Amino acid sequence: MHIPLNPNAPYTIFWFRQDLRIFDNLGLFEAAKIGPVIPIYIWDEDHRPDSKTGAASKWWLHHSLNYLNHSLDNNLNVYKGLPQEVINHIINTHPVKAVYWNRCYEPWRVTEDAKTKILLKERGTECKSFNSSLLWEPFTILKADKTPYKVYSAFYQNGCLKSSKPRELIPRPEKLILIKDHSNPTTLDHLNLLGSIPWHSKLEHHWDVGEKAAQKKLMTFLNSNLKGYKENRNYPAMKAVSRLSPHLHFGEISPHQIWHTLDQEETCQDKNHFLSEIAWREFSYYLLYHFPTLPYKNFRPQFDRFPWEKNALLLKAWQKGKTGYPIVDAGMRELWQTGYMHNRVRMIAGSFLVKNLLLHWHHGRDWFWDCLVDADLANNSASWQWVAGSGVDAAPYFRIFNPVTQGEKFDPTGLYTRHFVPELSKLPDQYLFKPWEASPEILKNARIILGKDYPTPIVDMKKSRQAALAAYKTGHT
DNA sequence: TGAAATGTTGGGGCG
DNA sequence: ACGCCCCAACATTTC
């Protein structure tokens, strides 16, 4: 056991990271138990090896930190810099006996945290990290042969569900004495997370940020949308999904709370299906931990030989929602306008980029990273590799979504598509997902000139499908 | 957490 | 009445 250099020092630093909440925050609870807490947040983007935060994520982070600061009676201490140096500085200027945080799992953070831990121990400061954002930490779940699972269902059913139950919920700290670092000149605004162009003001219409909003969203979901979830989650117009993803990413709510709250519900298909979606998040973190190259390297090496296209115009059309395929365009515009895209449409738009435009999944990864308020390294990497077919337990390469069929099936009344692609709003259901098949008469009545008001398809569905199958074949031989 | 091509079946029209 | 063909409707296979 290590004996702190200054065991009589009263303060514990609690380092907030992707756990921007008070309730069920294990590290914070433990820190508060042993005395007064200096709550800190460190903006370290300029000191990272890679992985810049996306614009939409920065918008969310700004508001989440602002909310957290209010919850802490304006005592949140915000810094800019390299975490090791910032923490060192605080310890040099305050009587600090310990530093606590909850663990993160991005590969570069794992490396940096290990270094920080060693440095703190060397200088005699107690240092503890906790798990507060995963139901099962990646290193606790392995196959019988001690290697990691590579198939989701086996991971979840045989790995997670048969190992220990997720820990119980942690109450709010009973006594939370907060210390403000008055020597610190940095404020939230100094982090400049919002930038100078107010492009993100549109996001404010769609989201309430912060711990309280996350709690409310969980309750609303349970009361209104859990029943029927398994089926309704496929229909983007139904708003039947939880939309908890950004809250989970920033740790405004813990997966443990979701798990235990659902545990009290009657067992049914819908409940188990929702829990299995939560488990997909666990699986993504699991893969990222065991395969740290997941964000950039094809998990299946056959894909390294795949003949991707290079076409800036096609990419631009996809990004802006001007592909000429209405369900794809609706999804891409939902993303741009709201910082979010319904899961069903993510799969359709993702499949379209990779399998119809034949553009590298890295382009999709990067655009989503910048635009999504729920951008998350584990989920984004694992999901794009899944869509591309290059991933672990991925969609087989020949599974190519047809955006016409998918639109007709999952947005049968066109409510979702018409909302985000209003120029098609007068087009009858029959042609909504294939306007190029409508007669001149029908187009005229709908006040659409194809190629002017709405694009003609940027690729031919049938030909591009054939091209993709051929390309995958050459890549795989 | 696909789609398209191909195969099979069975009812009905018709010579 | 019977066989033949057509073609939904469904099932299976292939990509």
Image (cartoon, coloured by chain):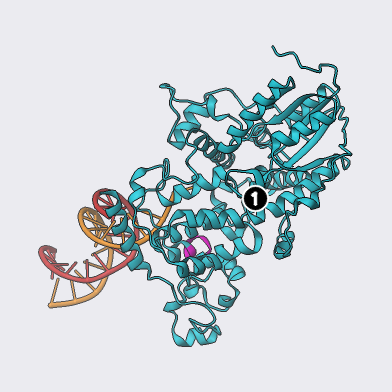
Chain colours: A cyan, B orange, C red
| Residue A28 visible somewhere in the drawing | yes
Residue A227 x, y percent position in the rendering: 62, 46
Residue A371 x, y percent position in the rendering: 61, 58
Residue A170 x, y percent position in the rendering: 74, 28
- Quarter of the image with the N terminus of chain A in it: top right
- The prevailing secondary structure element of the residues shown in magenta is helix
Magenta span contains residue A95: no
Magenta span contains residue A408: yes
Q: Secondary structure at mark 1?
A: loop
Q: Nearer the viewer, residue A235 or A365?
A: A365
Q: Please report the residue visible at 50 percent of the width from the left and 45 percent of the height from the top.
A: A295
Q: Is residue A465 above or below residue C6?
A: above
A340 left or right, relative to A76:
left
Q: Is residue A281 above or below residue B13?
A: above
Q: Please report the residue visible at 69 percent of the width from the left and 21 percent of the height from the top.
A: A121
Q: Nearer the viewer, residue A61 or C3?
A: A61
Q: Is residue A116 above or below residue A427?
A: above
Residue numbers of the magenta segment: A407-411
A103 left or right, relative to A139:
right
| Residue type at numbered disc 1 | Arg
Q: Which residue is mark 1?
A: A243
A45 left or right, relative to A34:
left
Residue A397 x, y percent position in the rendering: 36, 51
| Residue A30 visible somewhere in the drawing | no
